[in-house]
Amino acid sequence: MTAIATASALSLPISLCRSSKLNNKKGVRGGFRVFAVFTEEGGVEKKSSWETLFDVEDPRSKVPQRKGKFLDVNQALEVARYDIQYCDWRARQDVLTIMLLHEKVVDVLNPLARDYKSIGTVKKELAELQEELAQAHRQVHISEARVGTALDKLAYMEALVNDRLLQDRNATASDQTSSSPGTSSESLSVKQRRSPRKTLNVSGPVQPYHPRLMNFWYPVAFTADLKDDTMIPIDCFEEPWVIFRGKGGKPGCVQNTCAHRACPLHLGSVNEGRIQCPYHGWEYSTDGKCEKMPSTRLVDVKIKSLPCFEQEGMIWIWPGNDPPVATLPSLQPPSGFQVHAEIIMELPVEHGLLLDNLLDLAHAPFTHTSTFAKGWSVPSMVKFLTPASGLQGYWDPYPIDMEFRPPCMVLSTIGISKPGKLGGQSTDQCPTHLHQLHVCLPSSRQKTRLLYRMSLDFAPVLKHIPFMQYLWRHFAEQVLNEDLRLVVGQQERMINGANVWNWPVAYDKLGVRYRLWRDAVDRGSKQLPFDKTM
Ligand code: FES
Ligand SMILES: [Fe+2]
């Protein structure tokens, strides 16, 4: 599922804004917007005025000097920057040329001036101008091709940055390979030069979870779903747990297995803040202590329990062995948003695969053709723009901000425009927004408990429409099903040895960063990449 799950719902009356960044790029490709400057008399000022609009310094005198056969990162960046400057200048020159030629054509055809010229002279002048115009158009096509190449180069450099990150990660593995018998360092370096692209290796059955991954606060349920007498069974890191409210209404989380004969406790009931086993009636408090054993003498028995708290409408647990960190993270939508839907789904895929999917937007026009991305065109370039050390950024050309929040959360804000309009705006510039939270709880190595919360900063009335919850759920499921069949297929192949991150490209940046983070966790690294808290 992309992070725009229920944007599908909103495709009824509204559509997404479109980022201005794409339009800018298209501007370079498809022609400049030209402003005519009107005088007080209403006529168009002569070329001396609008020529200044094209008065941009010719960058050709600043061609970066290349030393040696290969460029280092800074030199390559300098070349890319020069290319863009040159393209900008060239495009302005092309437009200027065409405008001047156009003006000449108008002069030639001017009926007052024409009186003094023979038809033959006019025809000759027009033919010359036609040739000059054709030449100018050829130049535009060349510039267009150059812009395309410059953009490809930039995308490639972005990929290099990703590769660099991957390279750092693979450094240890490479060292080991180079020291192994039969692999000379020379042949390794040749091999690396021939195939500079490094890949992540996410293949084979999911390995047992590293204890480090458990040492986080995990949201597991919505407060609204936990009444005084309800029990919520969850699987977390391959262990069954049950959430219920203890004395005073405080939530607790105990193992969902009775100490007596391993009966599931969630099939029982909650009495006076204790969960009662449905088999022989043993009753446990939220700290796991058995406080009642009907029909026999009470003995000292305790089942496992986890630290459990309630915050901002969600129930959180700490499954790890380390002492829990003092502060629970905040996952609230930004101010001005109202929560409209809270949905839980149990999904038959490993949580990392689901996160990979949620952190990817480039698949939308191919996968979500029956829901929110119906009719979307495929952009010439999709990018996730983010600082080098960040896990948050925005999607170009979509008006969508996105963040991966460790250990398993995705937050996204989607700009929405008016019906039928593709406003050229970034997320901030869009008038209305949809905010989403996806929590992918690792239930087991092939199961995820997904918590989905959707908020809007408009249409508060929707909250009061009966059965709206069911509609939101229906829309979310529709979108998710479009993804699930693909992710389930990936999972099957992954288990059989295929690498689901075999060939990352520029738009996979956020997914790759998640995998780098996850990989560091799985290796037990103390210093996690991109972690603001470290
Ligand atoms: S199995 Fe739970 S009380 Fe017997
Ligand atoms: Fe999707």
Image: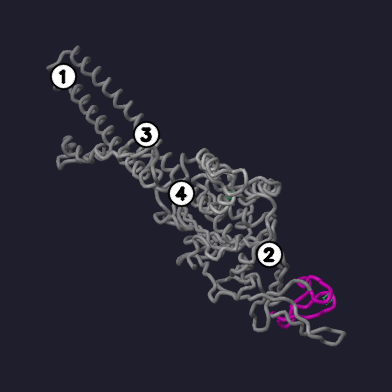
- Which residue carries the number 1 mark? 114
- Which residue carries the number 3 mark? 146
Q: Please name whichever residue, 178 or 11, is drawn nearer the observer in this view of the structure.
A: 178
- Which residue carries the number 4 mark? 161
Q: Please name whichever residue, 159 or 369, is drawn nearer the observer in this view of the structure.
A: 159
* Magenta highlight on residue 261: yes
Mark earlier in primary sequence (4, 3): 3
Q: Residue at x 78, y 78 (%)?
A: 276
Number of numbered discs present?
4
CA gap, disc 4 and disc 3: 23 Å
SS at badge 4: helix
Mark earlier in primary sequence (4, 2): 4
SS at badge 2: loop
Depth check, mark 1 against mark 2: the one in front is: 2
SS at badge 3: helix
Q: At label 2, which amino acid type do we have?
A: Phe
Q: Answer whether labels 4 and 2 touch (C-beta < 8 Å).
A: no
The disc label shown at residue 237, or none: 2
Depth check, mark 4 against mark 2: the one in front is: 4
